[in-house]
Amino acid sequence: MTPANDLFYMKKHVFLLSGLLSLGLIWSAGAQTSLTDPQIAMIAVTANSIDIDAGKLALEKSSNPKVKEFAQMMVRDHTAVNRKATNLAKKLNLTPEESDTSRSLKSDADKTMTKLRELSGAEFDKAYVDHEVEYHEAVIKVVTDTLIPNTKNAELKKLLEGAGPIFTSHLNHAKEVQSSLH
């Protein structure tokens, strides 16, 4: 390997490792089984906001049409889900509440965004899309296995269940884009 390849390899693995650590904290939501509906609402809003921010960054940094199309979809769809969640919270007079999980999600997202900002070109595209595949896989599992079963309010549960097919569609699209980048 050349020094440039070594640097790329190292950056790639540091980025993926930080992404996996972030996902590990998402998985920790499963360990926090005493989540309340306000905490679940905040986790959902935080997870959506993370994808919105990453999508906006990809729209700024990428020149790949497939990556830009995917990023636009992330911004549009996750903004719509957050709007529905916010409207539902107002209707239910439910104030989303921070938890260790939502704070960890935000902290790890900040670290991931810092790493993504350091990348450019094909290196950025690949790191962004790889992150999106891993992130959606983890979020789908946590929503399905932890958030939905622990949600008490029927309308909030319905909103989370309704978001499942959207997230699965995002995962499938991310995998298609990922395969086009390899």
Image (spheres, rainbow, N blue to C red):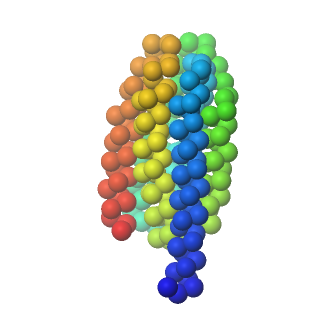
Q: In this view, does 149 lie to the left or right of 25?
A: left
Kindly identify the residue that appears in the image at 65 percent across and 40 percent down: 104
- Residue 161 at x, y percent in the picture: 39, 25
Identified at 52% across, 87% down, the residue is 2
Q: Quadrant of residue 8?
A: bottom right
Q: Position of residue 50 (x, y in %)?
A: 57, 44
Does 141 appear above or below 55?
above
Total marks placed? 0
- In this view, the residue in front, 151 or 86, is 151
Residue 13 seen from this side: yes
Horizontal relation, residue 69 to residue 94: left or right: left
Q: Which residue sits furthest front?
A: 31
Q: Residue furthest bottom?
A: 2
Q: Is residue 109 above or below residue 44?
A: below
Write the residue at 65% across / 53% down: 111
Viewer-proximal residue, 13 or 98? 13
Q: In which quarter of the image is the C terminus?
A: bottom left
Where residue 152 sits: x, y (%)?
A: 50, 13
Residue shown at 62% from the left, 61% from the top: 115
Residue 88 x %, y % = 52, 19
Q: Can residue 49 be seen in the rendering of this structure?
A: no
